[in-house]
Amino acid sequence: MSSRKTGKLLSKSERTIRKEKTVSFIILFFVTLLWMLPLVYMVGTSFKSEYDLQTHPETLLPSSGEWTLAHYQSFLSSDSDARIFAWLGNSLWSALAHVGLTVLLDLLTAFVLVFLDFKGKRVFVKLLYLWMAVPGVIGTAPMFAMFAAIRNGLSIQSAAGSYAYIYFWIVVPGISGIFNMLLMRNFFLSIPRDIVDSARSDGASNFKIFMRIIVPLARSTILLIVLFTFTGAWNSLNWPQLIFSGETSKWWTVTMGLTKFTDSQASAATTGVAMATSVFAMLPIIIVFLFTQNKMIDGMASSGIKG
Amino acid sequence: MTSDKQFITIQNVEKIYPNGEKAVYNFNLDIARNEFIVIVGPSGCGKSTTLRMIAGLEDITSGEIRMEGELLNFKPCKDRKMAIVFQSYALYPQMNVFGNIAFPLTINKYPAPVTDETLFSCNEVKTLVKQSNFAALVQLLSEISVERGGKRAERVATALNISLSGAERLLKLYARFGDSAEQWLAELQRQEEAQRSANQQKGIALNESFHVVDAEGKEVIRPRKLTPFEIKKKVYETAEKLDLTPYLDKLPRELSGGQMQRVALGRAIIKNVPVFLMDEPLSNLDAKLRLTMRSEIVKLHNRIGATTVYVTHDQTEAMTMADRIVVMSRGFIQQIDSPEDVYSAPANLFVAKFIGSPAMNLWDMRFDRAAATLTCGDFTLAVGKEFVRRYDEFYAEKTREFEQICSDFDETAREKINRILSATGEQPQNKKVKSKNLLDKIKRLFAKKSKEPAGPSAEEQLAREKLDALRNCLEGGTVAVGIRPERIVIEKVVEGKNYNGWYVTKPTICELLGGEYSVHFDFCGKDTVARLDANSPVTPSDEIAVKFDFETMYVFDPITGDVIKGLTR
């Protein structure tokens, strides 16, 4: 009602803008709904009772009065196989190590590529682009061969040694993601050269320029990379699955653990637990997203350059 | 031994960029101490490149830059004792104004004598207690002591103008002994003696100002970082000078252009270096602010006794600020002279066109050697015998010069031709524009390389053409004749007066500039500007009479761009 009243007061262009906004809102709403459905189904199902799961697998939410925490209790108090906290711990530290190393490597690489001059710089950048064109899957087989060969060569016996060795292979190969490096490089290219020149004439060494000028400026890009790599590391499944084969389930990551509930042996009996575990496993990602998303947007406008 | 005249010497400096483009040719300049040098030229003339080479931000391809006799070529930018102000201000966006100004101080170490802090501050406090009003001192301390926060010592130090450690000592004394002066002095005495004996045990010797001395009695100088308090003091001093104190907490993006410019200046001043390099620092400001900042910069330059190299494309800035102007075009220095001389005695056509606002009036006129006149349409101007002699001399010399160039066309000759082209404003035609089109690239790749020897290069051809043209000029030819607008004698036509020998016409535009008119009229097929006093109002419907005095005119050779005749003094 009120919008129709004010509508008369609006100019034609304003009405058009309003119309466009309404249409895009409706489209976005349905797309979002489509994306949200599995998520809602997951959360809803995790609260369904066994009876509900059997009779109404198609509903999004539990029937009224049938909400239960049984599945959560089941995996939290789980005695035997589902070691959710060990998995969470494994995932968490390896993902954090992954993020930290990636950001460090990306910052250093991009700094060298943008602000320092050396022979073969352009060739190097071209190689990076070329490397990005190679699908990651191609590397899996040779990498696994290397993983196994080196392991045999080192003849690691102790459990701690094996654990460290496996997680080295979980964390390290992933940090050289080219996309993030180029993302950082492109951001560095957008930093006016004058700022770096000015710092240099103020007496700053390359290290000081890096620490005092460039890294603080790159905060939003760093957060973006943190978000990308954290979700990537947290969700990675193929590679861990490959190198964890035959290892004790205590060492698994969360995603590995979840497959226990979704593979061929999974039944309706474990569906609830699977959903509850998934919800639990998603929490860190949501937390990271909440922390990074709004900081990612600001900061881009913080250039003190005119001209 | 270098004199003050050669504070910075730049010798034969050239710059070739990695892509083969030559940006600066044979740059020679001696900069005297405290001189304000302005390098001026159109965009792309190599002026910024020159500045960046002096600053050390750009490699020097060949040549030498020295400061006080010391070779700077391979000295990294950060050690050159120069401060740069950029056109974009280049403030660090994530730091506030304080952080920006303090930045150079926070990262550098400064040589300073090693001081025994304990003894120095004890002595400071003792003198203070003995000499100043003790009651007032206690009053101040009691006021500051009750305050909260960790900056109490800083406040005491600022209020009493003593060192930070002295202030800390005072506060401790006050907290421990209250307002008993005797106890204070006794405690200080005790502390001093303890420190002295400790020094004796370690074998540290001090002089009377508590600086550590070595075996020969010389002060030991070590580089050290400034303390946060020292930095704060200096930043506040600098901010005070530039009226920036209210903005110290703000981020660069919250400032206006003029304020950002002042922060950039502050960051340069605080380094306390002898040389300032400025790269078009005023280009981003609006007209009015530019005017104020212009005088601010000159004042600043004089006050701190700096040596400044200032790059601009604005000839007004160059004229108003410079002690000496360096005019550049296409990488060549066209002229180095005082503003007066650059204006009144331009070395070539380029300088004549570039300097002056409104620009010099220039016409192509026909020189008739036999009649000793310059003609343009119906208009004839007698030039006198002296000019004919000068003309003959000039062309004989130039012809000889070109014959030499053409006889043996090498790299030096090519550079000479390029230099001449930069003065006349002609475009060199040898640059074949390589198409970036992928298809063309592939075609080029497979194209047969021509077997026949390359013909004379475009420059050589040009040199020959010019030589022919010069030879033709010996019997008279076309010359470029110029006159400054204020030198044109002009008046409104009065009935009955005889205007024989005057050029009578109607103005096309009359612009009132306040005290005077800028009168435009067509002469010799070109728009011509003259100045007329605003006392006699003039409109495009009025008739004006114009008289040219050959004594006040310039004559340039359009082939080489050089001046044939300047002002007759």
Image (cartoon, rainbow, N blue to C red):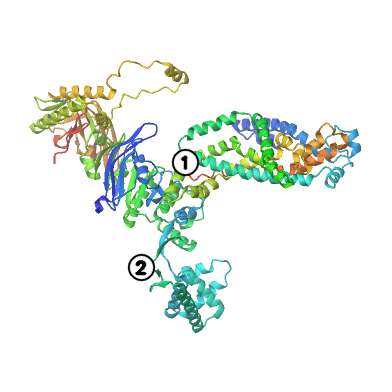
Q: CA gap, disc 1 to disc 2? A: 42 Å
Q: Can residue A259 be seen in this view?
A: yes
Say which of B568 and A290 sits in front: A290
Q: In the rendered image of this protein, does residue B247 appear above or below residue B86? A: below
Of the 4 image quadrants, the one containing the C terminus of chain B is top left
| Secondary structure type for disc 2 | loop
Residue B340, horizontal then vertical, whole percent: 23, 44
- Look at 56% across and 66% down and name the residue there: B150
Say which of B364 and B39 sits in front: B39
Tell me, for residue B218, which label it has, or none.
2
Q: Identity of the amino acid at label 2? A: Lys
| Secondary structure type for disc 1 | loop
Q: Identity of the amino acid at label 1? A: Leu
Residue A300, horizontal then vertical, whole percent: 56, 42
Q: Can residue B541 be seen in this view?
A: no
A76 relative position to A216: left or right: right
Taking the view exactly as shown, the residue that stands out farthest to the bottom is: B182
The chain identifier of the residue carrying mark 1 reads A
Of the 4 image quadrants, the one containing the N terminus of chain B is bottom left
Say which of B18 and B91 sits in front: B18
Q: In the rendered image of this protein, does residue A304 appear above or below residue B401? A: below
A49 relative position to B312: left or right: right
Mark 2: give few (<14), some (14-19) or many (20+) Cα within 10 Å: few
Q: Name the residue under label 1.
A: A116
Residue B75, horizontal then vertical, whole percent: 37, 48
- Look at 47% across and 41% down and name the residue there: A116
**Mark 1 and 2 residues: CB-CB less than 8 Å, in contact?**
no
Residue B18, horizontal then vertical, whole percent: 39, 34
Which picture quadrant has residue B521?
Answer: top left
The chain identifier of the residue carrying mark 2 reads B
A267 relative position to B287: left or right: right
